[in-house]
């Protein structure tokens, strides 16, 4: 939400994307937060992923769905390989979503994402 600050408020896309990202985070938390996910955790996580993509799909913009799908695939792939999923993992995807909303270009969108992360104290510089 910090990254979409200053964009035209008549476009609700930023709020919708933020909601979808919240579901995506719930999915990763359910699947991977503990030492081992139970069957119930897997179901909760799968449901959250589905809600994320469904929320994005409501915007009726295929580019959003494509980016959300790549986010899930890339995050799950890193986890399956035993790697951490960090904001650095998400930044190109988040920049892609923001670029679709803003039309200001991928580089400018990535700068917004990084600035928002710094503002939150993430320290990604």
Image (cartoon, rainbow, N blue to C red):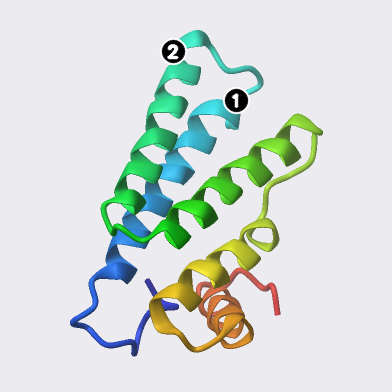
Tag 2 secondary structure:
helix
| Foreground: disc 2 or disc 1 | 2
The answer to whether marks 2 and 1 mark residues whose Cβ atoms lie closer than 8 Å is no
Q: Which mark is residue 124?
A: none
Tag 1 secondary structure:
loop
Residue 75 place in picture, x, y as percent: 65, 44
C-alpha span from label 2 to label 1: 13 Å
Mark 2 sits on what residue? 40
Rendering quarter of residue 23: top left
* Residue drawn at 58 percent across, 88 percent down: 108
Q: How many marks?
A: 2
Viewer-proximal residue among 101 and 85? 101
- Residue 110, compared with residue 76, is above or below; it is below
Residue at the far left: name it.
10
Viewer-proximal residue among 44 and 58? 58
Mark 1 sits on what residue? 34
Residue 16 place in picture, x, y as percent: 29, 60
């Amino acid at each position: 939400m910090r990254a979409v600050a200053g964009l035209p408020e008549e476009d609700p896309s930023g709020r919708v994307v933020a909601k979808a990202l919240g579901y995506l985070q719930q999915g990763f938390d359910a699947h991977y937060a503990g030492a081992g996910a139970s069957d119930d955790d897997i179901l909760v996580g799968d449901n959250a992923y589905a809600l994320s993509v469904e929320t994005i799909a409501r915007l009726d913009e295929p580019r959003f769905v494509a980016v959300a799908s790549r986010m899930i695939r890339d995050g799950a792939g890193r986890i399956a390989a035993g790697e951490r999923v960090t904001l650095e993992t998400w930044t190109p995807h988040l920049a892609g979503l923001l670029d679709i909303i803003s039309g200001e270009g991928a580089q400018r969108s990535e700068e917004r994402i990084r600035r928002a992360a710094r503002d939150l104290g993430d320290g990604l510089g």
